[in-house]
Amino acid sequence: MLRASTTFHPLSTHAKSQGLWYPDGNIVIKVDNTYYKLLASRLALYCGYFEKVLQNGAEDAAGASRSGETVDGCPVVNVTDITASEFETFASYLEKPLDHPVANAKMKTILVILRVSDVLSCPSLHDLAKARLRSLWWSSPIPRRKDNIDILLRMSDQHTLDAAMAIFLARRYKIDHVLKRAFYDILCKVSDWDNAESRTRLRLPLSDADIIILFQARSALLRRWRELLMTPPNGNEPEPACIACATVREYGEAERPWRREVADKFGPREPNDFFWEIENVVLPWIEQLRTEGRWCHSCLDDRQHAWEDVRELWWQQLDELFETGESA
Ligand SMILES: [Zn+2]
């Protein structure tokens, strides 16, 4: 005997999901105006949400409930807090993990999985999506760009948008070891933002406070960068520590010839990616100076070690500059 509220109704073809309609399904999930016929035991196993609804028939915060409606002989559960497209993405990753491994998911998908798995209480997919986000923005090692394609990719507008999204997700879902790398990748672009237009064009989902943090961190790094670049071999001591090189030749003033050396090489150049620049411009330049004979090896060793050591230090300090609340 059917309850009064129960209705059968034949679905029009477009209301049935194409991919998520199992002939042996025993529950129908309705999101927006689309119906998905799935396996109740599987949904209940992975999603606390469905477990609760199937056990109690209770309605709760996200609006999932047994509707009293029946389709194809299966009870219908309404889910109202997410869109059909979001549910489809989520369910594809849950139902067909071999075709849709979270480990390959792009940022847009990670966003959807984190959001839906939060609404439907699905810790398995939530954890996988968190791990995927961490792997994309892993903040422990100093970032190293693989090749020119990698550099172009990381300087693209899409990458900047993805980084801003990573910042949002890391905060929203408390995912550690993401913020620093995501902030840093945006920082590499900040030098392009002299005009407000490019920032507006990107419509970055960042607060004004975040933008200020980015600019301040960039100028702090730039200050450290210039100071280190201008520091002559063997420091600023008045007495030349070296009798073998230009330090002595120019009246014992190391600073002037070194500054000229720096100006010749760098001019007004400002790095986009400080760590890339150290690795690919500064250290090779010091190697080049060794062949030119104006500075002795001991002096240049001194500069080389200073630059090598500062990488780890600067990367650690970025946690504070970006206010991540973490330490390396
Ligand atoms: Zn020397």
Image (tube, rainbow, N blue to C red):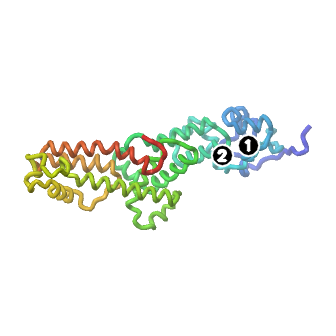
Q: Nearer the viewer, residue 35 or 206?
A: 206
Left or right: residue 5 compared with residue 15: right
Q: Amino acid at mark 1?
A: Ile
Q: Which residue is mark 2?
A: 87
Q: Is residue 196 visible?
A: yes
The residue drawn where x is 53% and y is 57% is 205
Q: Which residue is mark 1?
A: 29
Q: Give coordinates of residue 228: x percent, y percent.
A: 26, 51
- Indicate the quadrant containing the C terminus: top left, top right, bottom left or bottom right: top left
Q: Nearer the viewer, residue 297 or 64?
A: 297
Q: Is residue 328 above or below residue 205?
A: above
First in sequence: mark 2 vs mark 1: 1
- Indicate the quadrant containing the N terminus: top left, top right, bottom left or bottom right: top right
Q: Secondary structure at mark 2?
A: helix
Left or right: residue 189 compared with residue 17: left
The residue drawn where x is 11% and y is 46% is 242
Q: Give coordinates of residue 136: x percent, y percent.
A: 47, 43
Q: Farthest front residue?
A: 238
> Quick one: label 1, few (<14), some, or many (20+) residues within 10 Å?
many
Q: Amino acid at mark 2?
A: Phe
> Quick one: label 2, few (<14), some, or many (20+) residues within 10 Å?
many
